Amino acid sequence: MDVTIHFKEIDHKLYGYVEGEIDTFTASGLREELEAVKITEGLEIELDLSKVSYMDSTGLGIFVAFYKRAVREKGKVKLVGLSNRLQRLFEITGLSDLMDIETDKKVELR
Amino acid sequence: MAALGREKMKQLEAQYKKILADYIVNQTEKNLYIAQNFTRQLIQKNISPEDVISIHKNAIAEIFPDRMNEAQPAYDFLIEVMVHYGMAHREHQSLLQKQAEYEMEMKIATSIQKALLKTHIPKLSTVDIGMLSVPARKMNGDYVHFFYHRDDYLSVAVTDVVGKGVPAALCMSMVKYGLETLEYAYKEPSYVLEVINRVIEKGVDDSMFVSMFYGCLDTQRNMFSYASAGHEPALHYNAKQDQFVALEAKGLLLGVLPNTKYTYQEVILEDNDIITMMTDGVTEFRGNDHLNSRQIITSVIRDNKYLSAQQLCQLLYREIEKIHGFDLSDDFTVVILKK
């Protein structure tokens, strides 16, 4: 299974919808798509991961790299819609303290 | 053909025509053998398949001039086909050769890595130590490092590089040499993580980092101190209470931010207690989300707590391999300490 990302720009805010499984084999495509994003000062980017059914540590690496670039180029990145599994992955790795992360609200309510 | 020159080509054509004519008259093994030897000459002179057909066509035209009218287009057609066939064939051959070269280099790299990153399991009278590390592919992205001082102290670093294969292996060599320079500070988990973090942060690109669990056992005080950099928590089996406790210690992955601080925790280790450290290759059950990996690991350990530390590692590997249908997708590393 592959991974795809679609971007939408609304009111100067960039929304990215990621869908699929992110692992060693599918990661490079996603990395290229994210590297191609032009980050301008103050740009807010929100990546929705609610349709990510699997992610391994390579996937984590991609988001950290993107986050670090955004910080350097003075943009803002937020990850939203994380499943419990993804949330745990970000917690164990200590990344949830560093990055702006929002869990899947629907999951939380349940 | 151009390189060979018209003269040489004419010579080959004449030779071929003679061999073919002889064979048409007398279909013997000997005549066939002569043809075989001639093929070697063609290969030496780098004659392409389509040129061989063209040589054959010219020979037939001279031997059976009256039949050529019908056969001519068919031969021309075959020559065209062979031009493309020859190109595809050459490309295929050169790819095969390249692949063989890569495989050779990979083999060399793998054996260098094995030699560089070989972990020697220490034998102490005060604690039973077991370790198993099995790579999913050729190169291992996990690494275990031990420090010890007489029977009094044992430190262990369990590390996992993000990503697999060659880049992971290269990064791991860096971690190993970083650890080796820390011999003087091996009793201080937070300090070790802080130093290795700086080493990796300087040396590696943004998407490359390492998780590490670092623990130090003081066998005199029965104290296990530990710190974690984004690593899977270790499991502490308390024999007296027959209970497992996850040794959680919050800490960012190594290589993300330059001045990350790490805190350490301490836990008392009593007789028959078991500490299990592992990488996510042990706990990650992709496609088997309904299974609780922690429950499986703890029940294997509890049910077999009388085995030696090494036997426990092996058993855990076999059980988890079975769940994954004998096809583990991630490097698998487990270290077990038994008091």
Image (cartoon, coloured by chain):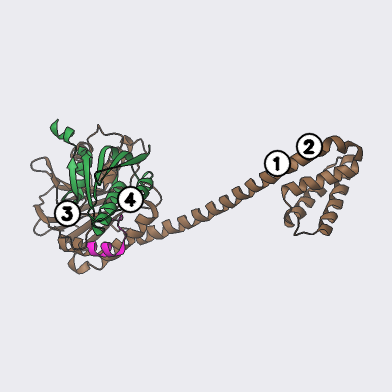
Q: Nearer the viewer, residue A103 or B29?
A: A103
Q: Give the chain ID for the green colour.
A: A
As helix, strand or loop, the secondary structure at mark 2 comes to helix
Q: Nearer the viewer, mark 2 or mark 3?
A: 2
Q: Which mark is residue B74?
A: 2
The span shown in magenta is B196-209
Mark 2 and mark 4 in contact (Cβ < 8 Å)?
no
Specify the amino acid type for callout 2. Answer: Ala
- Taking the view exactly as shown, the residue that stands out farthest to the top is A110
Badge 2 and badge 3 in a common chain? yes
In this structure image, what is the colour of chain B? Answer: brown
Specify the amino acid type for callout 1. Answer: Val
Task: Calculate the distance from the C-alpha at mark 4 to the C-alpha at mark 2.
Answer: 56 Å
Q: In the rendered image, which residue does mark 4 sit on?
A: A37
Specify the amino acid type for callout 4. Answer: Val
Mark 4 nearby-residue class (10 Å; few <14, some 14–19, many ≥20): few
Specify the amino acid type for callout 3. Answer: Gly
Mark 1 nearby-residue class (10 Å; few <14, some 14–19, many ≥20): few
Residue B286 pos. (x, y %): 30, 38
Res B5 visible: yes
Mark 3 and mark 2 in contact (Cβ < 8 Å)?
no
Mark 3 nearby-residue class (10 Å; few <14, some 14–19, many ≥20): many
Q: Which mark is residue B187?
A: none
As helix, strand or loop, the secondary structure at mark 4 comes to loop
Residue A81 pos. (x, y %): 21, 39
Q: In the rendered image, which residue does mark 3 sit on?
A: B251
